Amino acid sequence: MSELKHLKKEWKAVFSCMGCGDCGYAIRPAVGRYLTCPVKEAKGEEGFEIIFSRGRMNVLKSLLEGQIPLSKELAKWVYQCSECGNCTEVCHMTQNENIILPTCKWIDHVKVWEALRKDLIESGFAPLDRHGNIINYMNNDTMKNPYGEEKSKKFEWIKEFPEMKDRGEFMFFGGCTMPLRQVDTLKNMMKILKAAGVEIAISKDEWCCGSIGLRIGDISPLTDIAKHNIETFNNLGAKIIFTACAGCYRTWKKDYPELLGEVLPFEVKHITEILIDMLNSNKIPFKSDVGEKIKVTYHDPCHLGRHMNLYEIPRELISKIPGIMLIEMKRNRKNAWCCGAGGGVKSQFTDLAIEISKERIREALESGAEILTTSCPFCIGNLNDAYNQMGPEIQEKIKLIDIIDFIASRI
Amino acid sequence: MSELYKKLETIVSDKYLSNDIYVRHAYSRNVDIVLQGVPDIVIRPKDAQEISEILKVANEENVSVIPRGAGICEFGGSKPIGDNGIVLDLKRMDNILKLDEENLIVTVEAGISWGKLNENLCHFGLYTGCMGPGSGMSASIGGGISHHSVGGGGCAKFGACTNQLVSLEVVLPTGEIIETGSQANRFSKFPFNKFGNGPDLAGLFCGDNGIFGVKTKVSLQVFPKPEFAEYKTFQLPRKEREVSAKILSEIRHKGIDVYDAIYLMDLLVRIYTQEGVMPMWNQLKKKRGVIFYTVEANTERELAEKVNQLDKIMQDNKTEYLGSDISEGNIARWHYEEQGHWQFYHNLWGMFPTMQPLTAECFCPINIYPKIMDDIDQWDVEHDGDMRKIFEVAGNRPITGSGPILLINGNNVEITCGFASFGSYINGEMHHFIEDLNVALWKSLLERVTKHGVQWYMMGEFMSRLMVDIGAFSEEFYKLMKLIKKTVDPNMILSRGKFNFWGDK
């Protein structure tokens, strides 16, 4: 039987779960809470309790008590979780600053799931097949990205921007998804920055931030990745690095300092934090002829919202774009429904991830929005896959667009 | 694959059936920290017909079946007693079947949560009155009916949730499907009343703790939600237990239809502020208990009159009003406007890491609860030695006390009482003596409270058996209950072991 090295460190969290089941069933309209687990709901009638947090915690109690072993079969259940953290939110939920449930001090579900995943990896029961491929790609010196693309491909888009510096105080961390799958959005980001007169630098020696490995539980290469990336940007004189990816943002800002036990030598920002500064100092030259107001709703990426508490800046950004009316979906901010892509679900359980995104798109439509926007390439990618499957009856009513592309279209 | 599994597979598809060891362990526990029972199989039926067939197979194979709604019993009620049997997960059955707006009756599948039902009803300006158990935003309607649940809101005005019951569809342990109330008449077009057509057979299944049948369809009265409401919180003077009881009694004697009236003892206020749970009470100079009310009305004038009467009772009893905002300590506003949170009802839970409840919930008349609370304190003093043994390993001493005292129907209150303790697993090691001690202390405390003559309503594995073990049931009552059980469930397959209905049957 495995030593459960990582899970044992989380024993307080596991045994502090009281089994109340709100992580599976809670509906509390007065505070915008309409259910909790996107995976459970997407599974629909097949949703055995092991799918959501309480059932899984019961299994972990039995694991720690030595009643049952780790196994590959367990791994198949465990990886059907997008690690969105909505269970943590409901577990701690008083929704009122004057009342604080003590569980919020003891239970961080995502940390527990990641500890279990680390143990599964170290015991040889994980990664699952597709996750294994991703890890291999990331560890491959000719790739260093989870998409299995040649390293150089990540930087092809830069050719169109000869003005891009290769060192400086204000540096962009491109990550993998946008440079390899959403290049047009990167080009639009450059369009906005150029219009605002902002110069940036980029390193062609950045590696994947390691987020996917962390979420899957393969932490062995992560220290090297973090040190390499920090050293690379530090040596290039960075004072601020920013990223347009919510996953990279969380990894840089939260995971690297925790992993290394040190403060980073520069500030880490998300693109929305950069754009709002530019907007507030009137640097973004929006079109003046905007026509009728368009209703836009914003999807909170889990890695930006629940994981990093960045809720209001993207909203401020959207609401200040001329001709826009920001409206909220029924579930927003801390209660936001996940897109389903995180935690390795997109790569290993693609259909499940898409089902979850469909639910989010339907919710956006119900809000009356004409445009659904977000600020995470991983969310956009998955939402887009769902959107493309949903047919013209949906597509004619609502458009899906990255916040960067949307701003670029208005200047 | 077992013969049983193969037979069940012919009833539901394998998507809804599992003997996977991890799935089974996911269903092996409820809320308490000591009771576990791992089922052999978990099955998720879609309707009464499938349940009927499952129960027939269980009889053929002599296998126990335990119905499970949202699985939130605090006393091991919705997992097997021992490692065996089939858990019947009813959460697939969570649809609203019909809202009869004209007759103000809603019919739902029993696995639906109170939260989901009330969310739907609110779009019609309606609610269920009693909002089910404290865990109402998640707990199932079927579970509430099986336990006469209270606590989710409205139980001072509407009483236990079974008060609103109109009719039930139940699958008997031998597989027959029956309907009760007005639906006992096969010419009845829709459910409209619980009583009549002979004896109240729905009542047989209300509060049965899942031993007489599996509830599959529930018809409940619903009510227009009044437009106006007020909610106020007060700090109690000295001798708070007696004063709070006097206040609750006066509310009843004056006939004010308060929606909720709840007393939180000084221990809770003290620990809450000490541990940072209720920053809104930090300003309280004396950490005495608080009492709050919520009241509803159809007009402003009616509301004002009710508030005047309630405030006069509070003033006459020398309580101190805490102010209107939640930040001023008005937990009543949070409870009503933001629908509170059910862990607020079990406020010692999770106070320290891994601290969990070994409690039970009972009804008793208003005028005896102060004595019960005093005796619970006395019990704690008497068992300090054992508590300290747990402290030495866990690093914190278990805490004994009563959760909120809730005014319910009649001159009665609901008391959640017991102690919050720690499990056997501590920092990588199993300390089995803690489990033994927890069980012994839990039994000891609940036996003590039982002897005050209270009525346990949510009994699960623990209380249903303890009542028998300590000879608390009157002989005639227990005999009749057993006779009914034998009649409806000759093989004792349903919720086997509860009330000790197994062994010699």
Image: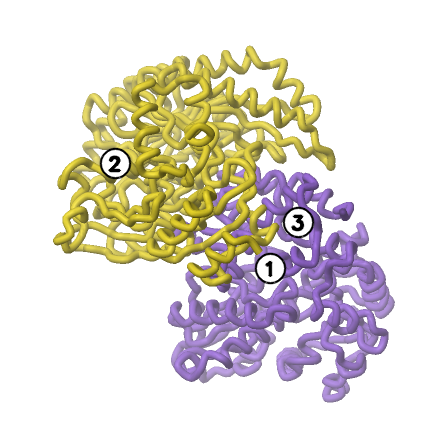
User: For this view, does B479 lie left or right of residue B287?
Assistant: left
User: For this view, does A4 lie left or right of residue B60?
Assistant: right
User: For this view, does B46 lie left or right of residue A184?
Assistant: left
Identify the element where label 1 is drawn. Answer: loop
Q: Are marks 1 and 3 on the same chain?
A: yes
**What hue does chain A carry in this figure?**
purple
Label 1 vs label 3: CA separation? 12 Å
User: Residue A216's x, y, as percent?
Assistant: 70, 61
Q: For residue B203, which numbered disc appears in the image?
A: 2
Judge by depth and name the residue closer to the eye, B372 or A405.
B372
* Residue B43, above or below A411: above
User: For this view, does B209 lie left or right of residue A167?
Assistant: left
**What hue does chain B carry in this figure?**
yellow
| Chain under callout 2 | B
Q: Is residue A292 visible?
A: yes
Q: Specify the color scheme.
A: by chain
Identify the element where label 2 is drawn. Answer: helix
Q: Is residue B280 visible?
A: no
User: Residue A200's x, y, as percent?
Assistant: 74, 75
